[in-house]
Amino acid sequence: MTVTRSGATATATWIALADGATGQRQFALPAPDAEQLTVGSGTLFAVYPTATGAREIHWWDLASGEAGGTVTVPRASDGMRRSTGGHFLSLWEVRGGKVTVLATSDPARARTFDLGPSPDWHWGTAAQRTLTVDEANGVLVAAGSDGRAHVIGLGGDEASDVPLPVLELTGATLSVTARDPSDDGTGATRSSYDFQGTFLLDGAGEAPLTVYGHVSAYRFHDYQPSPAALAPASVSGAARVVALGADEDAEPLFTLAFGSQDRQATTYDGTLSSTPGGERFGGDMDYTIELRAADR
């Protein structure tokens, strides 16, 4: 299922898993500036912010195209998240310690849960990674900066604080590759370089993490790239064209350059450019030249 929007029209396109047949339906949105469009339980949802920070949610039946209704939920500064299976939408106001949950099968009945007064519930952008609806277990989970998870049952169960497990790091495998050395401003280009690679926890059984780093070791050591990192052999040439009889330092009318990375080359790609003093001759011109050994 994909949903696209053009102005105040949303188009839902789906593919049937049974036979691969496709279908499409268009929906007239109440306004073109929907903050979010999502689907769940055979329903299309459009979310609109209000001036007070609350959210107005409209929904339509995907099969019939009929409008289902509208509900306004409290302020949700930290945005909306859709559960993995699409059965719940959760709207978070972390600073106020509140979260509002809609079951996509019954969106008219919005429920607001209290996360409690803990000051640990507001972490800026980190909130989007630490607040979720565990659909399989029917609970809300908010991981606090104090090393504990705040768990609330969607069925009205009493909230509980659960200590988060501590990762026992016994070892890790770090695989990195140095990038081309960069000039640190002193000309010591081999003393300053970036690296990138993977960081794999021993026994984690998960995909490796990505690691980025930088080394600056001026007058401590010089980094010498491996042969595989060296630039290929190359030849290049450049020349200046001046007025007839002018000396070598005169303002050029043209500049030309050519080069190749092929040791067996007999022709070389180049560029002929007219300098500001030679604009009347036109702009850049690409060319190919052939070099021959002099007759002996």
Image (cartoon, grey):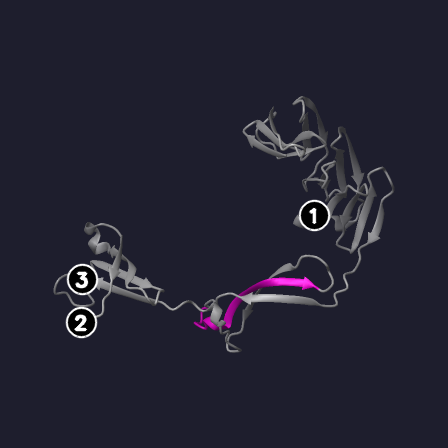
Please indicate whether residue 204 sits to the left or right of residue 22 in the image: right
Q: Is residue 208 magenta?
A: no
**Residue drawn at the location 22% of the way across and 58% of the way down:** 254
Q: Which residues are magenta?
A: 185-201
For marks 1 and 2 on the same chain, the one whose residue lies earlier in the sequence: 1
- Residue 295's tag is 2
Gap between marks 3 and 2, in whole Å? 28 Å
Q: Position of residue 22 (x, y in %)?
A: 61, 30
**Mark 3 falls on what kind of element?**
loop
Please indicate whether residue 8 sits to the left or right of residue 65 in the image: left
Q: In this figure, which residue is indicated by the disc labeled 3?
A: 242
Evaluate whether residue 246 shows in this view: yes
Gap between marks 1 and 2, in whole Å? 76 Å
- Badge 3 amino acid: Val
For marks 3 and 2 on the same chain, the one whose residue lies earlier in the sequence: 3
Position of 213 relative to 222 (above/below): above
- Residue 127's tag is 1
Q: Quadrant of the C terminus?
A: bottom left
Q: Position of residue 146 (x, y in %)?
A: 78, 55
**Residue drawn at the location 54% of the way across and 29% of the way down:** 7
Q: Position of residue 291 (x, y in %)?
A: 24, 65
